[in-house]
Structures are given as structure tokens and as C-alpha cells.
Amino acid sequence: MSGFVKVAQGVYHLPPPTPEFGAGVTLVTGINNFLIDCGAFDYSVSRYIVHALRELKLDIKDIDYLLFTHCDPENMGGIHKLRQLAPSIKVLSCGYQTERLKNPSYYFMNTWSDFLDYSPPFRELRGILVNGTVDSENRIFSELKPIFAQGHSADSVCWYHVRTQTLICGDAVQGGGTDETGIAFITSLQYYKNTLSDLIETSPENMVCGRDFVHCPSVINGRENCVNALEASYDVLSEYSAFVERYAKLVRKRKENLTAEEVAAAYFEEKNKPTRLGYAMHTFSEFLKAKR
């Protein structure tokens, strides 16, 4: 069974042990123990996170706070099981996360309403109320600093572990996506580009991503390697943005009556076509809406 991988002193990452687990989970230990994200399902907590913690001589009840990189189902679906097993845990949110956590199913359906046939599998998720909020000016007990990282989603946040200069990204940095998606899931190209520019300037010593992405494995050590991964992600985005803008001009000038599916297929014409075209379709559709 997979366990937590040490990233830096006091920072550990649990990569998704199975595709169904959800996104990876990060543990930050110290005077207070933090879990960042909690997997997609109840069993993500009971079957994997609990056992991985035991390997580090920790109990699930030793976790003081739960934070999120963002509130997609694969990152927060285990929250109710986690609260059941550790009733004293405090859930903290940042930015738009507070509202998304109240009704995560609504936001999922709103995101994918135009492309339900291409969306990830949907399931109803109960919302939660948080115990407190964190803003960008605060550090949580001097250990963790939130960095707003919009682009993948409106509520994306990176958590910066100050002492070890570790950047915990979730899905805010995805490189070229996965073999399944072919590209990062992006709700705003401009915000995503701004986020990557800001993160490159942080020049972290270590990085943790939500899963293994093209150009960005789940754990990266060394400042040069981290910056290279961030710059590679930026380069992919720049090439992708140029393509989207070119096709958007054709649509706006009515030179071609192209659907989002046709544009997505055109992007992968000379690349390995991914299993899911929905990510590219959504990005193109959102870009057109923003330009109207």
C-alpha cells in the first residue's frame, strides 16, 4: 500500500494510490498538524489516509486542521468521513472556497453544464460549513501562507510552507495535463498565465502537485527543477493560448462555424488524442464567453 512520501522536513505527500482515490493529499506536521485536501471518497480516508498516517506514527485524530487547494470533488469528497473519524478537526477555507464548500455539486454542474457528455463522472456531494477562513495576508501559525492561484478554478489556492520553501499546488500547476486529458483543465487562460508567472517568481525549493502531470510530477525537489517545471508549464500554456486565440478569432469573425469539440480535436490533430476532450472544449468555450 502506498504511503506518504517525504518532501521536506515536516512536509509529506500521499500521491493517489489508485486512480479512483482522487487527488493527492499533503501532510504538514509541527506544533499543529495540517492535512491539505482529503481525497474523493469516504474510502480515500478510511482505506488509505488513515493507514498512511499510521506509518508515520500518527492517528487521524492527530490532525488539527484541514485545508484545501481547491474544492473539486476529487479533493474534498472525503471530508465527511474525515470529520466522522476526527470530530475535533477544524476546516479552514480561503477565498471562494467557503461558498464552494457549501454546495460543491452545484459548482460542478455549473462548470460542466454545456459539456455533460464529456464531463468527469458526477455524484452528489453534501456541502459543509467551515470553522474559519484564511486570507492572503495571513500565515497559519507562521507555517503556511496562502497564495491565490486562479486559472484552474476560481477557488484555487497554493499553500507555501515558509520554513522549507515548499509550494503545495494542487491542480494550479498542471504542465501539459495527463495522458487522459491532454491539457490542463483551465477556466481562465489569463488568470492561469498570471498564476504561473507569480509562482515562477516565488522560486520554491520544493513543489507538490496534485498528481503526476506531464512536465510536473507530483513531487519536485530542488529550486532549479521547480522553476524548470513551472516554466515548462508556462510554455505549454503559451502555445495553447495562441492556438485558442487563433481559433476564437475565426469564430468571432464568422469565417468558420466551429464547435468546441471541433476546435479541441484540431488542437490534438498532431498530438496524442486524449481520452477526454472535455477539458479543451471547456477552455475554448470559456474563452469565447470572456471575449463577448
Image (tube, rainbow, N blue to C red):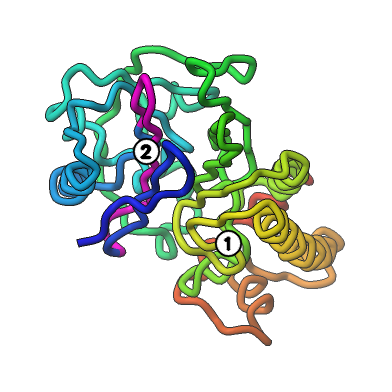
Residue 194 location (% of width, % of height):
76, 42
Q: Which residue is at a point 57% across and 33% down the rendered structure image? A: 160
Q: Which mark is residue 27?
A: 2
Q: Is residue 128 above or below residue 182?
A: above
Q: Secondary structure at mark 1?
A: loop
| Amino acid tagged 1 | Cys
Residue 48 location (% of width, % of height):
20, 51
Q: Which residue is at a point 31% across and 64% down the rendered structure image? A: 19
Q: Nearer the viewer, residue 161 or 88?
A: 161
Q: CA distance from mark 2 to mark 1?
A: 19 Å
- The crowding category of the residue bearing disc 2, from other C-alpha atoms within 10 Å (few below 14, some 14 to 19, many at least 20), is many
Whether residue 289 is visible, yes or no, is no
Q: Is residue 250 left or right of residue 49?
A: right
Q: Which residue is at a point 82% across and 58% down the rendered structure image? A: 252
Q: For mark 1, what is the residue?
A: 216
Whether residue 256 is visible, yes or no, is yes
Q: Which residue is at a point 56% across and 49% down the rendered structure image? A: 207
| Amino acid tagged 2 | Leu
Q: Which mark is residue 90?
A: none
Q: Specify the quadrant that holds the N terminus.
A: bottom left
Q: Specify the quadrant that holds the C terminus.
A: top right
